[in-house]
Amino acid sequence: MNFRELIAEVGITPRQVRYLIAEAFVPPPTGGRAHATYGREHVEAIRRYMRLRALGFTPASIRVLMQAREGVPFPVAPGVTLVIDPRHIAAGAPVEPLLQRISTILNETLNKKDTLT
């Protein structure tokens, strides 16, 4: 898609998109300046940034989250930390399957089971 189509898709101003690209929150377009094209990865990056901003994250904190190489740790309880790959943060994926899997792992790991009988 071209720049105008990208703007229509994401619903933000051209200036905002240029800022996000200049600050590396969104990858640069392909095809060079005269024939710049944008794809799903651009739309997803813009939407991820906008979701994080709506949640109250500052641009500086979003940059830290996105640049984390080993994952982003989120303490959820004393002694329990959830580490999330930065690609998944605010990506818009459904949460229910993850919650079910996490619940299963926690139950299997933390519940005492009588294995001697």
Image (cartoon, grey):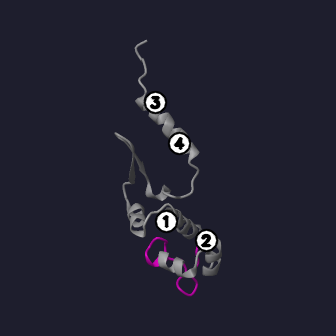
Q: Label 4 to label 3, Cα distance in Å? A: 14 Å
In the picture shown, does residue 113 fall above or below 44? Answer: above
Q: Position of residue 89 (x, y in %)?
A: 48, 57
- Residue that protrudes farthest toward the top in the picture: 117
Question: Mark 1: which secondary structure?
Answer: helix
Residue at point 52% right, 78% down?
A: 16
| Residue type, mark 4 in image | Leu
Question: Mark 2: which secondary structure?
Answer: helix
In the picture of the structure, the residue carrying the numbered disc 3 is: 108
* The quadrant where residue 113 appears: top left
Residue at point 41% right, 61% down?
A: 65
Q: Label 4 to label 1, Cα distance in Å? A: 24 Å
In the picture of the structure, the residue carrying the numbered disc 1 is: 53
Image depth: mark 2 or mark 3 in front: 2
Question: Mark 3: which secondary structure?
Answer: helix
**113 to the left or right of 6:** left
| Residue type, mark 1 in image | Arg
Q: Label 4 to label 2, Cα distance in Å? A: 28 Å
In the picture of the structure, the residue carrying the numbered disc 2 is: 10
Q: Quadrant of the N terminus?
A: bottom right
Query: How dense is the environment of label 3, judged by Cα within 10 Å: few (below 14), some, or many (20 and up)?
Result: few
Query: How dense is the environment of label 1, judged by Cα within 10 Å: few (below 14), some, or many (20 and up)?
Result: some
N-term mark: 3 or 1: 1
Image depth: mark 1 or mark 2 in front: 1
